[in-house]
Amino acid sequence: MGQLILKVVGAVIVIAAASACGEQKARALALRVQHLQQFRRALALLAAEISFTRPVLPYAFKTAAERSSFPARELLLEAAVMLLAGGELTAREIWKKAVDRVLPETCCTAADREIIESLGASLGVCEQEGQLNQIRLTMSQLDCALEEALGQKHRSEKMWRYLGFAGGAALVIFFL
């Protein structure tokens, strides 16, 4: 009797763990969409800030960050703090460092990272119009990545949930 109870408890634990893994993967797909949307909104705020108030770059980052959400807020604040601290690094290098620090905490892919990192190419180098053009280009690339992420989410979210449960159930059957 005790052995049967242990087997049932073990089976429940295996199925629950596998289901949790599937749920985590499905949630990561949804979070990627959310993170890309946040980056898109933050860049729109940054473009408006640069276009209309014409502040120095760190202050534009700071203002856009104040009206943004995670992870864009952290990225812009990190870049603003490093720019204000000064030093020998260029704005491009600072942007890359900020991306390196913040993006590992997100569900963004390597392709998403490249898009966001590419914004640094014109930061602090080009005049206002060049920076705005780079921001618009990055926003359009983020739109494409967002469209792809939404498609992937719709195609794969349920599959990962079912796969987690089914994988756990298959393991239980295999071990019985």
Image (cartoon, rainbow, N blue to C red):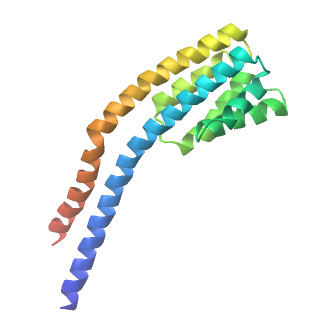
Q: Between residue 6 and residue 159, name the one nearer to us.
A: 159
Split into 4 quadrants, where in the image is the C terminus?
Answer: bottom left
The answer to whether residue 136 is above or below residue 17 is above
Residue 86 x, y percent position in the rendering: 84, 30
Task: Name the residue located 43 percent from the left edge and 36 percent from the top edge.
Answer: 33
Task: Name the residue located 42 percent from the left edge and 28 percent from the top edge.
Answer: 146
The answer to whether residue 119 is above or below residue 63 is above
In the picture, measured across the screen, residue 78 lies left or right of residue 21, that is: right
Q: Quadrant of residue 4?
A: bottom left
Task: Name the residue located 27 percent from the left edge and 75 percent from the top edge.
Answer: 10
Task: Name the residue located 65 percent from the left edge and 20 percent from the top edge.
Answer: 48
Extreme residue in the front direction: 52
The answer to whether residue 10 is above or below residue 35 is below
In the picture, measured across the screen, residue 35 lies left or right of residue 57, that is: left
- Total marks shown come to 0
Residue 82 x, y percent position in the rendering: 77, 34
Residue 90 x, y percent position in the rendering: 76, 22
Q: Between residue 52 and residue 130, name the one nearer to us.
A: 52
Split into 4 quadrants, where in the image is the N terminus?
Answer: bottom left
